[in-house]
Amino acid sequence: MIFGQFSASAWLVVAQHELLLFAAAFFALGVADEIAVDLAWLWLRLSGRAPTGAIDDEASGTAPLTGHAAVFIPAWREAPVIGATIAHALAVWRYRDLTLYVGCYRNDPETIASTVAVARGDSRVRLVIVDSDGPTSKADCLNHLFGALCADEERRGAEVRMVVLHDAEDMVDPAALTVLDQAMDQADFVQLPVMALPQSNSRWIGSHYADEFAESHGKTMVVRSALCRAVPGAGVGCAVGRRMLGRLAEFSAGPGPFAAQSLTEDYELGLKIAALGGTGRFIRLRNGEGQLVATRAYFPSDVVAAVRQKTRWMHGIALQSWDRLGWSGSPVEKWMQLRDRRGPFAAGLLFIGYAMVISLAASAILDRLGYISLPPFSPLLRGLLMFSMTGLIWRAASRFAFTAREYGLREGALAVPRMMVSNIIAIMAGRRAIAAYLRSLRGVPVLWDKTDHSDHPAFSLPPEVRA
């Protein structure tokens, strides 16, 4: 059949109209969902229920902690960055009641050597060797660190106050432990913001994470913390009360509190704590210079690594957690869980949306050439498209505002076109996440599909601050 034939053109027009109507309807739902979060954030800000507070710089990093703090840092093939992470943490966290538990694998001598070299006999660093070849899963490594902590507590005869989670590539904030320690008086789980730093060598791939975290941790997590008991963990810059971690271990099916078979054990952590009756909080504070108290890190700078990372997030949060955790909590918490789990569907919807843009452009050309005859859009479709377009403009303005607030007007302006980069990576990750989930249903074991790191924010700091 050719385009000039009536049946071919009719089928093309019908298929295009139905797919466009389908996409427009769900895009409109997505716009309504985002507007609801925006309105909730505005209400919280105007009512004073979600202020961004301030912290005394003189107290950060030097004031005594209420109790001993244990920092868990799982590491697999992190020799290029683990030394910078440990050295910077020891330099800015000058507390005596602090132990960094660094988990390495017996078949990763480079990371072990880097950890030993930078510790230089500092008693605040505790190297833990996992007694099996890596990688297992990140949660399995964390469980080995928990076992080492329990052994140390038994020798000391006292428990730590809190356990803080960090990744091997993080640059910690000098004020973070002070903030987390104080927040433990009112919560069982506390999450600080994450700042994905823009990268001059990766303006589009690596820097798009900065836009996403600026908006997510500047708005969505603020709303979630104010309206829900459950605050999902980001895996870095978060603290769990020691007694709550013990309760998680008691109810766990494995040897420790972390879900060894989960790709996103950090995300599950906050939800499980809420299920046990605990309270989670997301805290935003700024220091005297106006900088956010947050964990800073570089994220993947190439497409392949970014797609792999987001595949893991989407697989673990959207698909695994649905199986593992189900649906629980208040209606608002179920709404937030639905937002977490829409990733694969949203990726498919984005693919259809972009395909429709190309299809409409091609159809317009064919219509002008006389091969087909395009009917006008129905009032319903026209209304949905207008609403979705208005929502897209609103979303772009929101992304600009939140990115510009943290990184300046230039990055805010770049954040708008980077939304397309984010969408394309999400489409690619969505397909891979579904394929990975189907493989897991056939019994394929969960392994630590981690991101390789070669750069660290502390490398650009003066030597006296870096270490």
Image: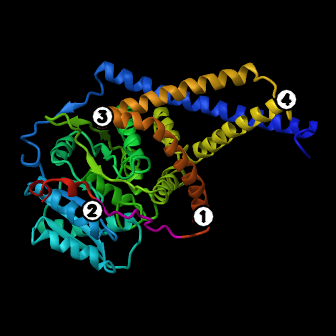
Earlier sequence position, callout 3 versus callout 2: 2
Viewer-nearest of discs 1 and 2: 2
Quadrant of the rendered image containing residue 53:
top left
Earlier sequence position, callout 1 versus callout 2: 2
Q: CA gap, disc 1 to disc 3?
A: 45 Å
Drawn side of residue 458 relative to residue 370, left or right:
left
Name the element at disc 4.
loop
Name the element at disc 1.
helix
Drawn side of residue 255 relative to residue 444, left or right:
left
Name the element at disc 2.
strand
Query: Residue 165: image x %, image y %?
Result: 28, 55
Earlier sequence position, callout 2 versus callout 4: 2
Name the element at disc 3.
loop
Residue 441: give its label. 1
Q: CA gap, disc 2 to disc 4?
A: 62 Å
Q: Which residue is mark 2?
A: 73
Contact check, label 1 and label 3, Cβ < 8 Å: no
Depth check: give the residue in front, 19 or 131: 19
- At label 1, the amino acid type is Leu
Q: Which residue is mark 4?
A: 373
Q: Which residue is mark 3?
A: 408
Earlier sequence position, callout 3 versus callout 4: 4
The residue at 16%/57% (across/down) is 88
The residue at 85%/31% (across/down) is 370
Contact check, label 2 and label 4, Cβ < 8 Å: no
Q: CA gap, disc 3 to disc 4?
A: 48 Å
Earlier sequence position, callout 1 versus callout 3: 3
Q: Is residue 449 magenta?
A: yes
Crowding near the residue tagged with mark 1, few <14, some 14–19, many ≥20 C-alpha atoms within 10 Å: few
Residue 432: give its label. none
Depth check: give the residue in front, 195 or 156: 195
